[in-house]
Amino acid sequence: MNKRYLITQSLLSSWNYMFDCFDGCEEGAKEEFINTLRRIQKETTPEMQNGIDFENEVYKVTHGVQRNPHPKWEPGIQAVAKEIMYAPNQIKISREMSSVCGMDLLIYGILDSLKCGTIYDVKFSNKSFGSAEVYGKYLNSPQHATYFYLVPEADTFKYLLSDGNDLYTETYTRANTKPLEELLHNFFDSLSDMGLMDVYKEHWISKG
């Protein structure tokens, strides 16, 4: 059996951030990507924990779990939950892709929600929308390209971003999304240029 190598949207997003980060953040972004490539566990920051907690509260609402209203985020929780009500959440899915730069790949992801041909992804902003630039925030994200490949029958991807008060949605279709295969060729070319292909192959071989 040929070796297969794992690809996740989080790996691609970490790589993409090196080229899409704010000026002056390049070195930190590269260090973070190399840590991701080496599969070094990242410590959960308070900001990351807020995102986890917000998402968990949304799922409690969609699943009808008895809960107390959140003291700060309830409007945002309810707005996001309304979008994905009665839909399955946290769907693990994988799909093979053959002969990409001479490698066989296993693409893996966890969908926050899937309903009627639309993939939904829940995001939380620690900054209020009044102080954050959100328009076009996910234009260059590899996430919708990855999940469109994982779910061939889906034709729409919708980011659901909340600051706890308001809801901002950003929608992409399959027609206006770069194919994952093209993105992966760029990814592997970049790894080769940085001398990191062997690091990828060492840490991202699929065991399944």
Image (cartoon, rainbow, N blue to C red):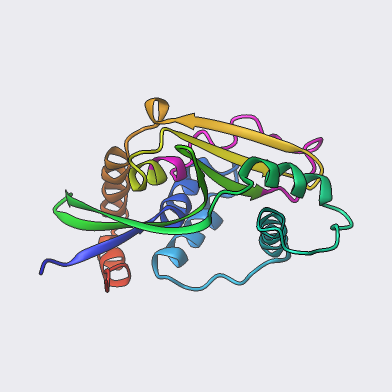
Residue at horizontal 48 percent and vertical 48 percent from the top: 18
Residue at horizontal 38 percent and vertical 57 percent from the top: 93
Q: Is residue 39 in the magenta section?
A: no
Task: Describe residue 79's horizontal placement relative to residue 208 as left or right.
Answer: right
Quarter of the image for the N terminus: give it: bottom left
Say which of 188 and 48 sits in front. 48
Residue at horizontal 64 percent and vertical 69 percent from the top: 44
- Magenta part of the chain: 124-145
> Can you see residue 88?
yes
Image quadrant in which you'd find residue 180: top left
> Can you see residue 127?
no
Say which of 180 and 24 sits in front. 180
Residue 137: give x, y in percent of width and height. 60, 36
Q: Residue furthest top?
A: 175
Task: Describe residue 34's horizontal placement relative to residue 56 as left or right.
Answer: left
Quarter of the image for the C terminus: give it: bottom left
Task: Describe residue 128's horizontal placement relative to residue 184 as left or right.
Answer: right
Residue 63: give x, y in percent of width and height. 66, 58
Q: Residue furthest right?
A: 71
Task: Describe residue 114's horizontal placement relative to residue 180 as left or right.
Answer: right
107 is higher (above) or lower (below) than 139: below
Is the magenta region chiefly helix, strand or loop?
A: loop
Residue at horizontal 26 percent and vertical 53 percent from the top: 192
Say which of 194 and 95 sits in front. 95
33 is higher (above) or lower (below) than 128: below
Say which of 78 and 180 sits in front. 78
Residue 8: give x, y in percent of width and height. 39, 57
